[in-house]
Image (spheres, rainbow, N blue to C red):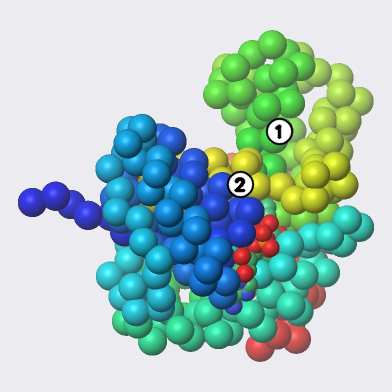
Amino acid sequence: MVDTKKVVIIGCGNVGMSYAYALLNQKTYVNELCLIDLNKERVEGEVMDLNHCLAFSPSTMKIEVGDYPCCKDADLIVIAAGANQKPGETRLDLLKKNASIFKGIIDNVMASGFNGIFMIATNPVDIMTYITQKYSGLPHHKVIGTGTSLDTARLRYLIGDKLKVDPANVHGYVIGEHGDSEFVPWSNVNVGLQKISDFLYEDDMKKIAEEVKNAAYEIINKKGATYYGIGMTLVKLTNAILGNEHAIAVVSNYDETNDVYVGLPAVLDGSGVSRKIFFDLNKEEEKKLQNSIDIIKENIKDLF
Ligand code: NAD
């Protein structure tokens, strides 16, 4: 018998469709894909277009227009529905709009009998993940946000580009809020096995961290939205979960001490977040992480 892995995408705009297209371009564990959006006609068009890729895709997939009942037997639901940043807007500016959209979405999903894993991409992602867990009542380890995974990919690319090293061999993370208070704990960044301080001066590190933090603003100013990077990030996280890969990623996961979801490294497998990865921060980095957590906390305090 074929082991079917079903993914439902809710929100089929730039991000949702970049993810779907990236899935089709790789060998993945997904063999059933169901698309839901308020704009039904657009989804019909997207499904037709995606199905026309299948003859050339390395994956075998059943792709269809969905509605909430199709969430019932989904292994993974990826939510990318809601408003995106307009030029000049921060991710936190989206909170009010997206929080009210999520109430309806999560209620509908849970009414289907869904008991799989949620992966949230909608911004502000740490808070939208927290909201999803509250509304769904699912255990924390089954509700995950993309966190600072994309920011980390941007960091690895920039370091790799500067040092002429494959980004796959740059090891380090952006942590904290996926937003303006995120930061790079440089004391934990390595190229191969060598410390980053053997390669970069502090000024270079500052410049790279700023570039990472401002990447979304720059892309939005130039082309209106960011989507390919997060599309690939979502595929990586999907494979980690559906392939039971035990892969480490820096996702929004639940921090019991502070009662927030925040971007920190964790092991992902078929159960969702199977465990956290602990690592040492210096005093200054600890302060930055707490500041980031406090900003997230401040923004959720009036929601529940
Ligand atoms: P978009 O406007 O292109 O798409 C949003 C889609 O959501 C639209 O198709 C819309 O019809 C749909 N939608 C709205 N309300 C809905 C509802 N109630 N039910 C179902 N569908 C609904 O926006 P986008 O560029 O795809 O961005 C989507 C989200 O992803 C934004 O919040 C954006 O900030 C976020 N994003 C996150 C990251 C990340 O790293 N996590 C990166 C890029 C974008």
Q: Is mark 2 within 8 Å of ligand 1?
A: yes
Nearer-the-camera pick, 232 or 207: 232
Q: Earlier in the sequence, mark 2 or mark 1?
A: 1
Q: Residue at x 53, y 79 (%)?
A: 105
In this orientation, does residue 11 appear? yes
Residue 163's tag is none
Task: Identify which amino acid the numbered label 2 is placed on.
Answer: Ile
In this orientation, does residue 274 appear? no
Circle 2: element type: helix
Q: Residue at x 84, y 36 (%)?
A: 211
Q: Is residue 281 left or right of residue 67?
A: right
Task: Name the image quarter holding residue 256.
Answer: bottom right
Residue ID for mark 1: 155
How many numbered discs sit on the rendered protein? Answer: 2
Q: Is residue 295 left or right of residue 6?
A: right
**110 to 179, vertically: above or below:** below
Task: Name the image quarter holding residue 8.
Answer: bottom left
Residue ID for mark 2: 230
**166 to 23, vertically: above or below:** above
Quadrant location of ligand 1? Answer: bottom right
x, y percentage for residue 109?
43, 79
Q: Quadrant of the C terminus?
A: bottom right
Task: Identify which amino acid the numbered label 1 is placed on.
Answer: Leu
Q: Residues within 10 Å of mark 2 (few under 14, many from 20)?
A: many
Residue pushed farthest top?
A: 164
Circle 1: element type: helix
Mark 2 or mark 1, which is nearer to you? 2
Q: Residue at x 36, y 35 (%)?
A: 57
Q: Residues within 10 Å of mark 1 (few under 14, many from 20)?
A: many
x, y percentage for residue 87?
88, 56
**168 to 135, vertically: above or below:** above
